[in-house]
Amino acid sequence: MQNYMDCSNLKVLGVIPARYASTRFPGKPLALINGKPMIRHVFENASKCKFLSELYVATDNNLILKEVQKFTQNVLLTSPNHTNGTERVAEVQKILENKGKIFDVIINIQGDEPFIDPSDITKLIKLFNSNKNKIDTQNNNTVDIATLVHKIEFSEADDNNRVKVVIDKNGKALYFSRSVIPFFSPKNEFKPNYYQHIGIYAFNSKILPIIVELPKSSLEKSENLEQLRWLENGYNIYTDITHNKPNPVDVEEDLLKFQNC
């Protein structure tokens, strides 16, 4: 657990990317859960985080735009050419900055986690005011990017769809992989901890416009994980542990688990 300090002085922008053309589940943000579109569940739960200064939905589709406008005007139509959510979030930052709205931290909130716990968003924000962020910047130990991890068992780690992460004693990410890391041999009496990466990111607002312009790195191409591009270019990713298990909607069948929630 990180040593937190007050973060009420930070201006924080939350952005929920909502793309229509999901390969496995087209129109996913509009899927109904207990009578409400999924994107509305995400927005309403994320808005419960008291440290968010503003919260926006960023979409590439007019159907989603019109649906979101039924419950908030904080929605922007963004380019259909983005390759990932990070790029879409960076466009929102640019649009708002051009309107004179400047933020310290930008958070990419997953649009397929309808019942996201607002306390997890708070954890990310507080990492930017933790003691590690007071370390001499000459040592390059400040928080550039923050994300969450969830402790899992070895039996769960042996799944290529779960992204594992190795962290140092201060919570700084050392590497992300689809493989089982760290290595464990039954002959070894020491059993390491295994952490699954949770795909929600908070960015130092000065860093985000830079990292979206970086070319794909060799490690990123190998693992198909964009966060490795950031590590390979020397940016610091710090983590905190959440006890909330990830519960995304990846395919239409996943909606069944949320009925009557």
Image (cartoon, rainbow, N blue to C red):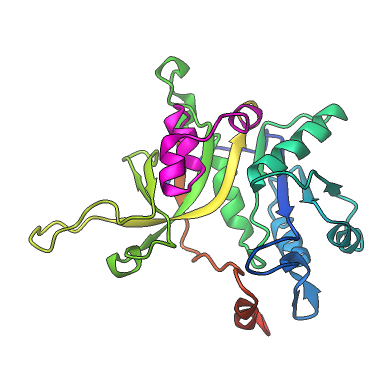
Above or below for 21 versus 237: below
Residue 74 lies, in percent from the top left, at 86, 49
Camera sees residue 138: yes
4 and 107: which is toward the camera? 107
Residue 1 position in % (x across, y down): 41, 48
Q: Residue furthest left?
A: 187
Side (left or right) of 71 relative to 186: right
Q: Quadrant of the C terminus?
A: bottom right
- When asked about the image quadrant of residue 172, the answer is top left
Query: Is 14 located above or below residue 103 in the figure?
Result: below
Q: For residue 93, what is the image quadrant?
A: top right
Residue under the image location 23 percent in, 55 percent down: 192
| Front residue (pair 157, 224) | 224
Name the spot of residue 213 as percent of width and height, x first: 62, 29
Point 63% across, 68% down: residue: 24
Q: Does any portion of residue 3 appear in the rendered image?
A: no
Residue occupying image coordinates x 37% and y 42% = 175
The image quadrant that residue 53 belongs to is: top right
**In front: 97, or 29?**
29
- Residue at 40% x, 18% y is 139
Magenta residues, start to end: 208-236
Provide residue 165's location: percent of width, then percent of height: 38, 49
The answer to whether 174 appears left or right of 236 in the picture is left
Q: Is residue 143 above or below residue 182?
A: above
Whether residue 147 is in magenta: the answer is no
